[in-house]
Amino acid sequence: MLNSKLIDILKSFSKEEIKKFSEFLASPFHNKNKKAILLYEILSKHHPHYEHKNLTKENLFISIFTDSDKTSAFNDASIRNLLSDLMILAEKFLGHTEAEKDRFFFNEKILKGLENRNLSGVFEKRIKTAEDVLNNNLFEGEEDFYKKFILEELKSNNSQYYDNLKLYKSDFILKASDYLTYYYLIRTFKMINFFEWQKQYNIDQSSGLALEILRGVNLDEIAEKSKSKVIRRS
């Protein structure tokens, strides 16, 4: 039986993902390694268990690297490299799949591409779409503040390319700093709560930089100010 990290990834694929990964590999944009396609065609026949006794590196080598009219000596390095190549492609497929699920992440990458190409007119239209997606969803906690921070950062960066005066007159950086602060504070309060629970296990927290900084901060006062500011913004 074949023992490989690649097999662990393939076992996690649903039937639909098995089909989509095949399409992913067939696209020259994602993959130009024809032997990787052949390897996957052989492996996917054994989905989801991949436990057939003939599923070995030696048999895979014969199927992929040996011509029908001649025999080649088994080369372990060749099949291991091919398995590694297919695993990298499987990881890229996972990243691609997850990116498609996250509309904000997808829009962010488009915006960065537009910004890098100085396409300010298209950028302005696209960022409105990204803001609408974020604002029309239910509030999901501190991650929403971080996403708002990213959008304000992108707007300030875009202004630097074509209109410094607009940047100086705008509140992009002020909003970005506020949103980043809200994100940091919520995450910090959650961590403090975790640290309190951790004390019952006598975990040494004396070396934590965050706790050292927070000892000199009036968290109640900051939380109250942040709360009132968020209410005014909404």
Image (tube, grey):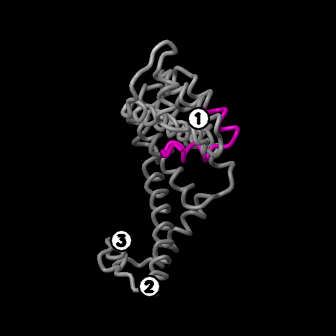
Placement of the C terminus among the 4 image quadrants? bottom right
Dot 3 falls on a residue whose secondary structure is: helix
> Can residue 102 be seen here?
no
Question: In the visual, does 12 lie left or right of 154?
Answer: right
Mark earlier in primary sequence (3, 1): 1
Q: Is residue 216 above or below residue 86?
A: below
Task: Give the prevailing secondary structure in the magenta stretch.
Answer: helix
Check residue 201 in the rendering and tell me which mark sits there, or answer none. Answer: 2
Dot 2 falls on a residue whose secondary structure is: helix
Q: Work out how far the residue at label 2 is from the one at label 3, CA to CA, in angstroms.
A: 20 Å
Q: Residue furthest left?
A: 207
| Magenta stretch contains residue 14 | yes
Q: State the extent of the magenta-drawn residues as a range.
A: 1-21
**Residue 155 placed where, x, y %?**
47, 40
Check residue 145 in the rendering and tell me which mark sits there, or answer none. Answer: none
Name the residue type under label 3: Ala
Name the residue type under label 2: Tyr
Check residue 210 in the rendering and tell me which mark sits there, or answer none. Answer: 3
Examine the image and state in which quarter residue 229 appears. Answer: bottom right
Q: Residues within 10 Å of mark 1 (few under 14, many from 20)?
A: some
Residue at the spot of label 1? 43
Q: Work out how far the residue at label 3 is from the one at label 1, CA to CA, in angstroms.
A: 48 Å
Q: Work out how far the residue at label 1 is from the one at label 2, CA to CA, in angstroms.
A: 46 Å
Name the residue type under label 1: Leu
